[in-house]
Image (cartoon, rainbow, N blue to C red):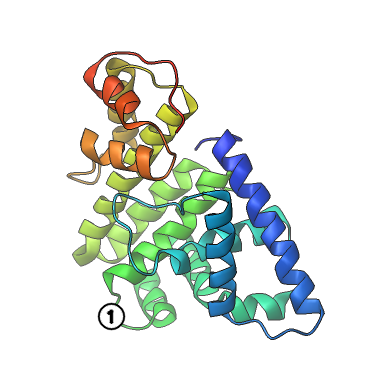
Amino acid sequence: MVGKSRDVQRRLALLMDLWNDILEKWESGEKLTRERVVDMLREAYSKEKISPLRGASIPEDLYDKEMASLYVVGKYGMGLEEIYPKLFDEIFKNEIKYDRAINILLTEDPETARDKVSVILGGRLDDNTIARMFRLKFTEVYFGFSDEESLVNLLKAFAKAFPEKERIAAKYARFYIAFKVAASIYRGDVRDRITKEALKQASALSFSDFQGSIPDDSYIEKIAVGVFGVRRNYIRGILGGTRKKKHYS
């Protein structure tokens, strides 16, 4: 979605360094739990002043959700899952389940997928579990390990398998579009209201199956400021139609 932008490069460097710390502890025989690794992730982000990938809200379990980034970089960026399967089983049980569920949704017919995913994720699916599953695919897209089409296909496949939960897929489509536009503003690809609106509407075409997936500008602003550190007066200038030069906080 954003290629090798400055933000992606910073996050990749941080997560790879954190993986080195984790592997050093693991190989030395230190007992590692998911809670311990979440704390290490929180400390690393705090030190580098990096915000977890998120929407407008800041949930209490944000850093536990951000473990998706560590998992994706470790698995797809560094090829560690095959080398350290026990470590992944110990720390990333949730992400492994979401990965399995995603693969089933993308490859099985809706009825079969519904049954299998329900078993993998635990019977009645709550909104948080579903959003975490979508987040894993979104994170792959963000870091460039998967393409946007795969996320679109996942949301559509989920809505077909779980039509009563379609609103969650629509809500996630709205988040993704807002995040994509915010990231484009951060990179400097979007510098005026017309370009912003064009990108927003073009992106929404991919998610046309979902009603209410087009985000409003206030949502885009919250992500741009909260996640990317874009100056509020700069983005409001864009949303209002004027151009500014400096946009990093």
* 15 and 94: which is toward the camera: 15
* Rendered image quadrant of residue 192: top left
**Looking at the picture, how far across and down is residue 33, in whole percent?**
60, 82
Quick check: can you spot residue 20?
Answer: yes
Q: In the displayed structure, would residue 74 be above or below residue 185?
A: below
* Rendered image quadrant of residue 22: bottom right
* Rendered image quadrant of residue 37: bottom right
* 164 and 140: which is toward the camera: 140
Q: In the displayed structure, would residue 56 be above or below residue 188?
A: below
131 with respect to 170 (left or right): right
Residue drawn at (40%, 74%), measured in percent from left and top?
117
Residue at the spot of label 1? 124
Quick check: can you spot residue 215?
Answer: no
Give amino acid for label 1: Arg
Q: In the displayed structure, would residue 237 be above or below residue 102?
A: above
Residue drawn at (40%, 55%), measured in percent from left and top?
154
241 with respect to 16 (left or right): left
* 241 and 71: which is toward the camera: 241
**Looking at the picture, how far across and down is residue 6, in whole percent?**
58, 34
**Looking at the picture, how far across and down is residue 85, in whole percent?**
71, 76
**Looking at the picture, how far across and down is residue 234, in whole percent?**
34, 24
